[in-house]
Amino acid sequence: MPAPLLELRDIAKHFAGVKALDGVSLAIQPGEIHCLAGENGSGKSTLIKVVSGVNSVDSGEILIDGEPVGHMTPRLAIARGVQVIYQDFSLFGNLTVAENLSIGAELRERRRIVSWRRMRAHAESAVRRLGVQLDLDATVDSLPTSGRQLVAIARALMADPRLLIMDEPTTALTGREVATLFGVVRDIQARGIAVLFVSHKMREMLDISERLTVLRSGRVVAAGPIGQFDEPAITRAMTGSDIAEDPYVWSGDDAAPNLLEVEGLTVPGELDAVSFSIRPGEIVGVSGLLGSGRTELALALFGMRPTYAGTIRMDGAPVRLDSVQAAIARRIAYVPEDRLTEGLFLPETIDRNIIVTALPRLSRFGVMRMRDAAAAAARTIRDMAIATPTGDRPVTQLSGGNQQRVVIGRWLLQDPRLLILNGPTVGVDVGSKAGIHRAIRALARARGLGVLMISDDLPELVGQCSRVLVMHRGRLTAELPGVPAEHGAAGLRATERALSDRLKALV
Amino acid sequence: MSATLNAPPVRSGIARTLLRRPEIAVASLALVSMLAIGAINPAFWSAGNLFSLLRANVIIGILSLGVMMIMLSGGIDVSFPAFAIAAMYVTIKTMIAWNYDGVVLPFIGATAIGLLLGLVNALFVTRLKMIPLIVTLGTGTAVRGFLLGVIGVSTINIDHMPQALIGFARTDLIDVTQANGQHVGLSAMVLVYLVLALGVHLMLRHTLIGRSIYALGGGEEAARRAGFSVPGTVFFIYGLAGALAGFTGLLHGSMIWIANPHDMAGLELDVIAAVVLGGASIFGGRGSVLGTMLGVFTLVMLTNSLIIMHIDTTWQRIVTGAIVIVAAAITSWRDRGRSA
Amino acid sequence: MSDVTKRPRMWRLGRLGRIDPALLQMAGLTLLVFVVMAALNPEKFLRPYVFESITYVAPELGLLSIAMMLAMLTGGIDLSVIGIANLAGILAGLYFHAHGGSSGPGLTRMAPGPVAVGIVIALSTGLVAGAINGVLIARVRLTPILATIGSGQIFTGIALVLTGGPAIVGYPRLWGAIGNDSLWGVAIPLLVLLAAAALIGLMLTRTSFGIALKLIGTNLRAARFAGLRTARTIFLSYVLSGLLASMAGILLSARTNAAKSDYGVSYLLEAVLIAVLGGTNPAGGRGSVPGIVLALAALMLLSSGLQLLRFSNFLVDFVWGAFLLLSIALNALRNRTR
């Protein structure tokens, strides 16, 4: 067997006392499609930076073609054929496709005067090499995400790479666009270029990857040919949690009126005649591929798609959710997908991050009742079991799991009827995850909340939801019933597999 | 946030063309305004009026080139009037003190003073990572304060102005005799402006440093990853803008035969208005020399034609303010349409 | 500007437990300026007259600085405050001249009623002008820099059109009292400033509006997802900024007995400087009234001291500009070593 194209041996990297990488070993063969999976914060990004020479290592060795490279630098990495396509693509949106493709070469050749003819020829050869159609004169901003990605790939290929690293390549793509991307990647592979996919959403990668490495907390927790894994196994490796032993079973009154009824909810280009209902105390899961419309469904219910068509009823009465305030007035709460940019006010205190949803209620004639506010914050900290001695610490000092409790807990001040959770335990460690699940169940059982839970994490959906909806291209395409308690873990596994098969069939 | 499949806003072909080529929109506006003003008062079309309009483009025009470059990179500059006047006043004072009468050396000197001051701006923007508006507000005030507090407050009038400078700025390109027998000339300074504009255009379009300005405006992190030197580019832009300001300051003094250290106060607003009207985006990455020149032409024409339209000149500021707001609204609508 | 460089907040909800270190630093600086000026020129500087005159002159600037800080809290800026202040003073003056003549006892001895109307006119000017800014920024979604540059030109332009250029001179004596008299031995302008500062300070720390404003400045997206009325809050912050600017206009015209479209142009930089020096983050999310008041005190002591040392007003301008740059440099260094 020839020496691997790239080999990492026992790499360790610390940041301010935190182990980002802890003895990571990994080998990529020439022309191989390798998938590096791991949740946010597992060390994936650090690993990319180590391989591309942006970060130096504390200990361990990097070998290319079997030879140690010593100190890796960005320049050296590029010279040895490593190219990274970042999640944001790092393109210039205001410039044309042609210029984006060729400006790097002008820069590398240290030109002072740019020749538009030379740049155009260069860009044409880049597009030809990739074998795709791109309008060279369009500005990159005018392209859809998939088009931008193709530009980024074409640009990377111009540097004659031997290893192409793609950071979260499918995040912003629709199912169809993912299929196109994979066609392109197979093509690249056929030319002997190795591809490393780095992702926390590995479902899409299963088809195409040949080998898989799973990172968790800076360590390799699973590795091997892709054939050895199925999706549940990968999820278990990524999250470290096994499927719950006790499924959530809805025990409400069948005759009770529905809490939420959605009929023919349509948002052009996003949702297509979605109809479903939630009863008090139910936890309804939503599964689907990227771009399936799951997040848009949540946003529509939270008043962020004011022009929607269709009927939404709460407790049998039709409601018009055309603003966030209207949704909140109906006691609908939403915990967004990206905690750091959509959920938290980072430099602010835990207290302020909690009371933000209840400012009008905690004030009289606009003046805050400071004592009530402090009490409300303290109560939430206690109810959600947020691990902090006081609420006047910056929220940045909390762990991911505790931060998520803050974002969920802030809505409890509004006494919600419907709680929409989008990725409730992404980037949360195992122990904290179980705690969050317990808290959600308790809210549903004790307060009769309806919960809509969107997640990529199949064991989470199957274990925590009383039933699961499957979305595809803006429509609801299937509904999986909950697992009766007496079927226990075996029943959960069977449902999980059924859900996994259904999602795979959609790609 | 996850993928949104927003259908792109439907717009007619004409609207799209106008948004893609803001130059066409500004040119149309200029044309319509010319026809309208000409209809109100045919004197607008007299050679004398047209020549003086073109002459009035020169100073604002060259300053706008510098501001446009800075906006392209995503910054903004309000310090250039102070730099221009400081360079002019110091240069002319030095010429008088040394009893020097020439053209080339003084212009080199004034340009160098502007360049140095521009580099100070760049230093604060790149090394100390402060918002350009606040940096240039500070440098502008400090330079003006230093000029008036240390160098001098008195206006140097035509009797003491170096004659070579005045002679240079009086050069005419064309001489026309109007119907009333009056001789009117087109100032050669218009040519200076056109040459500088062409130079900046060629630099932006055909040199790597020019493209790096657009790249920086497109995304600082992306520019860094592509291998551009971000600090180098910022020093270049602010340095060049400062140099242009220094040069323009002396040109201004030469053209009006007066060196007044209080001059050009508030001119930054007109210049920013012209640049924004020319289609440059304050968020960077979008803008062109042609658009800017058209913006300058339109602004100067509208504000200078108030008299011949029998409107009191006190309305000038209201016109400028309205232009800033309308142009900014249109560009922000355009930029939002693109990113949707 | 990265969030990492922002310092954690040190206020505890409900009680003033700890004090922001930046505030202590500002207090130290104020004291330092005082001591240096006193040491350089003790017999002139340490006279009550110096401090008394500051209490009449500084409040205008203080109000403008608080207005600037309010706009900066959401990452914006208000470059139209000077235009609003002048327009407010001019409109009130025009009303007085129309009501009581442009000079003589009809004007100077005007009854409290019409003077109160003048105050209402001036304050309404600020409210309307601020509302225009607010609509442009929060609804039309213009960049605050361009919106307020443009509106500032328009406000100044209106003032110019109304007056034709020259200053409006001569105000009722009662109006002048607002800028020149004292109450319980304290300058009325200072009382106005202290009242406004206390109200805005309490508003920022103790009302739902103030807390929402800061949270919006910290993370606009998260604020939307948390259900805060972002557009309305930003709109109101500019209305408030306009109102404060018109109060400054009242003080300015009352103190000088005149109003002109281009008065107080140098106040713009000074207001920005005081806001930044007082701990406001121009990128949004951080700013406090006590910081502004201390920065105002430090800079007013500095410029009075310099004037006593026979520095010209221009040189004082230079020192202010240099001070702004210096404070930027110091902030950058401090964040780097952290």
Image (cartoon, rainbow, N blue to C red):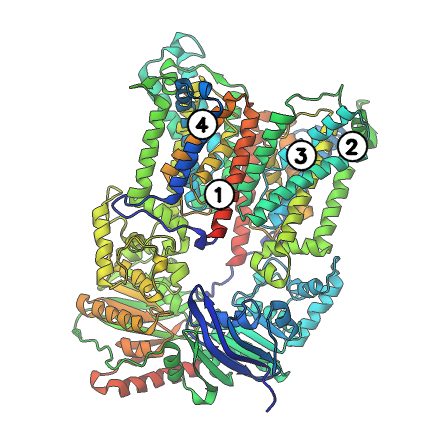
Residue under label 2: B187
Check if mark 4 and mark 3 are on a common chain: no
Sequence-earlier tag: 4 or 1: 1
Left or right of A237, for residue B157: right
Mark 1, other Cα within 10 Å: few <14 / some 14–19 / many ≥20: many
Residue type (three-letter) at the residue carrying disc 3:
Ala
Check if mark 1 and mark 2 are on a common chain: no
Residue type (three-letter) at the residue carrying disc 4:
Leu
From mark 4 to mark 3, how far is it between C-alphas? 32 Å
From mark 4 to mark 1, how far is it between C-alphas? 31 Å
Q: In the image, what residue occupies the spot 56% across and 81% down?
A: A7
Q: In the image, what residue occupies the spot 30% across and 73% down?
A: A431
Residue type (three-letter) at the residue carrying disc 1:
Pro
Mark 4, other Cα within 10 Å: few <14 / some 14–19 / many ≥20: many
Sequence-earlier tag: 2 or 3: 3
Left or right of C322, for residue B236: right
Q: Which chain is mark 1 on?
A: C
Left or right of C304, for residue A128: right
From mark 1 to mark 2, how far is it between C-alphas? 38 Å
Q: What element carries label 4?
A: helix
* Residue A433 to residue A372: above or below: below
Residue under label 1: C144
From mark 4 to mark 2, how far is it between C-alphas? 50 Å
Q: Which chain is mark 4 on?
A: C
Mark 2, other Cα within 10 Å: few <14 / some 14–19 / many ≥20: many
From mark 3 to mark 1, how far is it between C-alphas? 26 Å
Residue under label 4: C301
Contact (CB < 8 A) between labels 2 and 3? no
